Image (cartoon, helix red, strand yellow):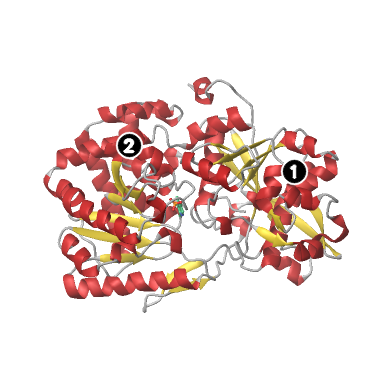
Amino acid sequence: MEIALEGDVPTYSGGLGILAGDTIRSAADLQLPMVGVTLTYNAGYFYQMIAPDGRQVERDIRWDFSVDFGKVEAKVKLELQDKSLTVGAWQYTVVGRSGHVIPVYLLDTDLPENEPWQRNLTRVLYDASPFQRIVQEMILGICGVRMLRKLGYNDITTFHMNEGHAAFMVFELLDQFKSIDEVKRHCVFTTHTPVRAGHDQFDYGLVQDVFRDRLPQNAKELAGQDMCNMTILALNGSRYCNAVAMKHGEISRRMFPDYTIDHITNGIHMSYWLSPYMHALFDSELGAAWHHDYHSLEGALQLSGMEVWRAHQKSKLDLLDYEKSHSWVLLDEKLLTIGFARRVTEYKRPLLIFSDLERFAKIVAGKAQFIFAGKSHPADNQAKSFIKNINDFSDYLWNSYKVRVVFLGNYDMDLARLLVSGVDVWLNNPRRYREASGTSGMKAALNGVLNFSVLDGWWIEGAVRDPLAGWAIGPGPEDPDAEKKDDSVDVEDLYTKLQDEIIPIYRKNPDDWRNRMKHAIYLASFFNTHRMVEEYAAKAYRLEKQPLWKSLI
Ligand SMILES: *Cc1c(COP(=O)(O)O)cnc(C)c1O
């Protein structure tokens, strides 16, 4: 449903789209024969403003597809209810480091031959209405396959469903191949959420209404008896299925015990997310091979601590320049700066650090400052109230304690790039085991920023690979009751570590801090999409046994 191609091309909402974009960027660098399919949205996801009273305000984005994409002449049809809908496409080209090209096709219904309501079907990403949603998923899964055929892609060996959103392709391929075993031979599936509500399900009344007599006879066998469950449909239509981190694999197998589900831990595209200053440092100290050979970063501990620090300070100044021109809360570059930016939603517990405002203020006053950012889904009123709360806490903490907390508007890839390289510590405190992987912490680590995070998603693996790359908050997965513990257990550990370890080391022991920064960078030798794409190539696509980067050096 989303691929983040560029920061200011609004075809994405968050982590899922950014992972898709990084996957394609790495696949292009590693010269994989791949093509991407997604939708493009007239109003984007939304542009976020923060009103003077601290609430989120949403605006439609005004943009012209033809500025970013080339028009594709081919069109395909979708029978929808008792009408026919025409679906067109745009093309964006991702070019890898050595010139290898991966085209991305973006489907669009805003065509003059469609009725006005049909032209609006691709208006906005993650519309809350089930009708809009199911139709968008039909466009993605069914028209995606039809468009590829129309464009002459007749020898596709593997269709990779990135999340259940694309699973209607199983029905489409079944229509072509006539046998579910043949469909399975051609499909693989990646599930991206351990949260039950995150798995799309449609009422069969709605499914029947949109498909009419075109629904396969065995639809319920494939997609579930009670509800049309897109995850079940994708699982039943795939020869290989995977989750996106080790713990997420465990949870997915528990949720879907009848299926074999592997895991391939997510990554990030290193050169996309690395600050220009670190980039120059890596080039000069590690050599150009790191762009292909992620193992080069295992040498991160040999980098000069002073040079890593200098590069980071430049990134920090860039971030604070941006921050000061977008907020009335003026941050101070001498203070330890802690970032918290992600989709604003209940399970990420954005208010956890404010649990005891007086205690918090006493720990950080004159020593640390905070930058928050993130969008709430427009229909999620609880999440929207969190943004207002953070802004109210910011006023209170400044007025009472001169503590600086800023909330920056419109979190997107460009702001993320500044944040993950410019803060000193990256904070993440989700409710346990709701984070499939998380990738923003990987971006931070790559840039020498220390993670301070609940042991969930990728950080369970990261903290084991290198305990000096950051700090854990609260109990780990070895504690069988960790999930059931009250929030206060995490709050206590968060405040204690901030007060007794993080702030004192930052202020009094710069050598220790710089050493830890190198350990953070070391983690990127594993948590990157080059390694991840290689795992997909070997385990899911069955393409190569040899490391892909080896042939490029
Ligand atoms: C990386 C990124 C995300 C995903 O980060 P999480 O760790 O999953 O929260 C979301 N939004 C933006 C803009 C990002 O750059």
Kindly identify the amino acid type of the residue bearing the numbered disc 1.
Leu
Crowding at label 1, few (<14), some or many (≥20) Cα neighbours within 10 Å? some
Residue 73 appearing in the image: no
Q: Is residue 211 left or right of residue 192?
A: right
Q: Is residue 314 left or right of residue 408?
A: left
Check disc 1 and report its element: helix, strand or loop.
helix
Residue 428 appearing in the image: yes
Kindly identify the amino acid type of the residue bearing the numbered disc 2.
Ile
Crowding at label 2, few (<14), some or many (≥20) Cα neighbours within 10 Å? many
Check disc 2 and report its element: helix, strand or loop.
helix
Instruction: Name the residue nearer the viewer: 251 or 396.
Output: 251
Tag of residue 148: 1
Outermost residue toward the front?
A: 481
Q: Is residue 198 left or right of residue 296?
A: right
Q: Give the label, 1 or 2, closer to the camera.
A: 2
Tag of residue 521: 2
For the point 84% across and 42% down, the residue is: 176
Residue 523, quarter of the rendered image:
top left
Residue 146: percent from left, percent from top = 78, 47
Instruction: Name the residue nearer the viewer: 254 or 503.
Output: 254
Tag of residue 51: none
- CB-based contact (under 8 Å), mark 1 and mark 2: no
Residue 546: percent from left, percent from top = 55, 20
Among the two numbered marks 1 and 2 on one chain, the one whose residue lies closer to the N terminus: 1
Residue 464: percent from left, percent from top = 35, 36
* Count of picture labels: 2
Instruction: Name the residue nearer the viewer: 485 or 103.
Output: 485
For the point 54% across and 34% down, the residue is: 533
Q: Quadrant of the N terminus?
A: bottom right
Residue 545, quarter of the rendered image:
top right
Real-space Cα distance between discs 1 and 2?
A: 39 Å
